[in-house]
Image (cartoon, grey):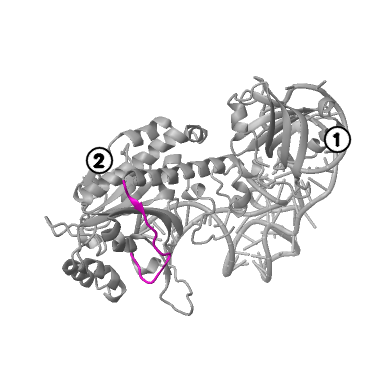
Amino acid sequence: MVKSHWVGEVQSGMYDDQEVELKGWIYRTRGSNKIRFIVLRDSTGTIQCVAKRDTVGDEIFEGLKGALIETSVILNGHVNVDERAPGGHEIVVSSATIVGSVNPENPFPITQSAMENADGGETEFLLDNRHLYLRTGRMTTMLKLRSSAFGAIHSYFRDSDFIEYQAPCFVAGAVEGGSTLFEVPYFGRKDVYLTQSWQLYAEAAMPALEKLYTIAPSFRAEKSRTRRHLTEFWHAEMEMAWAGNSDIMEHGEGLVRHIAQTFLDERTPELESLGRDLDLIARYADNPYPRMRYDEAVETLQGMSVDIEWGQDLDYSKEKILTQDFDVPHFLTHYPKVAKPFYHRVDPDDEKYVLCHDLLAPEGYGEIIGGGERTWSEEEILRRIDEEGTPRDAYEFYIDVRRFGGVPHGGFGLGVDRVISWLSGAEHIREVIPFPRDSRRVTP
RNA sequence: GCCGCUUUAGCUUAGAUGGUGGAGCGUGGGACUGUUAAUCCCAAGGUCGCCGGUUCGAACCCGGCAAGCGGCGCCA
């Protein structure tokens, strides 16, 4: 049952002039009454297979003639090096078995025309048929990049002695403003939500593990309809004891550069197939990411005659103007206290600011990391909660962490899908996740 | 929460000024011994998103509804 040969291996020249057995799906098929060309696809690539009536006999030939796109087959044959075949290798078929056929009355719906004007798979039809669109080239490429990104995150943190730690998805409180929480019916209770962040629970484990990370889904009930938003997204978060804002930024930069380098190491053909400029990715992997204070960003924007006042948060329209000349991601630090929630630590050098950072990706992709130092003393967290008029009850356990040996600490959250979207050059974040969830779509 | 756009065959779409709809791909049949998104010939396939209105007559004009998409705010 297990495969003995893979298309990618054959195309690499491993089996030149040898007999192989390939298992896969028909990607394209064409031919005459005497000769049939079948382009076979498996997870490693495609290869042209030639079946001649004289060689395979009438029964097999007729079977292959009637086999439509996405029919699953086992083909046995000889590997020929042949310039006429795409990839330079070709299988001369000696025998064939059809494993799973496709009914002509219901052919595979993802046709060339279905993808014609929708390279990113953004038509209603392709979104409705996402379960079938997954096996097409562009989607397969995105899923491979995605796998490399997840692997890179794990290897970065583990190589830096972080411990993987899991938080619950059902939570009874909010990290961000309450309006973006998904309520979950929970045995009749009305105060249960899907988590928006691992952070609060990570802070509870921080005194135990000191350096910890996770990759987990986060949920935000934002009705945002943009190329950057999903309601369910994958969140890579880290929390670190005895660390300041710049220590945390170093890890944020290190992580993103490591993901970019992993893409170059593992997925060069995939990036090229997407038309991505490899020099650009190399620049993201090799160069340091500059840091800019909020004040400097505001001054820069004001210098460009953008209508912004000190104290305003930088929304996407401002980020976009600011990042249009960036050639690598930039950190923005030291936002005004009034623009950020209570858990950000106030800058002891100037109480107007908090010790936080956002990492903004270039090419118009916007924010990919948000993080900073946490308010870590009991006295200060109580003052900040009261200042914001937030009820203390919801954060009892969070405050408790500070009652027993609080230490300086902090962390960040990275939008994994956003990073993949940016590095792959996707038009929309939906392109890089198999079954995207937004405010209007939860199927398939 | 706000603003905008779209909806014609399985898919992608053409249909100025209102006169019951064309094509390409796919599918079926036929031709072809080397194709590269093969090509050529033929055929089937459409209550023009739904409801109502104007009109002798609506895919087209008007109103409502629905679904989808794009963007803003907010964020990763």
Instruction: State which mark lies toward you, 1 or 2.
Output: 1
Q: Residue at x 76, y 45 (%)?
A: A101
User: Which chain hosts label 1?
Assistant: A
The C terminus of chain A sits in image quarter: bottom right
Quadrant for residue A381, please give it. Answer: bottom left
Q: What range is drawn magenta here?
A: A161-175
Residue type at numbered disc 2:
Pro
Residue for badge 1? A59
Q: Earlier in the sequence, mark 1 or mark 2?
A: 1
Left or right side of A427 for B45: right
Q: Secondary structure at mark 2?
A: loop
Spot occupied by residue A165 in the image (x, y as percentages of width and height): 37, 57
Spot occupied by residue B11 in the image (x, y as percentages of width and height): 66, 48
Question: Would you say residue A114 is visible in this rendering?
Answer: yes
Q: Residue A251 in magenta?
A: no
Badge 2 crowding class, 10 Å Cα cut-off, few under 14, some 14 to 19, many 20 or more, is few
Residue A290's tag is 2
- In this picture, is A395 found above or below A223? below
User: Which chain hosts label 2?
Assistant: A
Q: Residue A169 in magenta?
A: yes
Q: Are dots 1 and 2 in contact, CB under 8 Å?
A: no
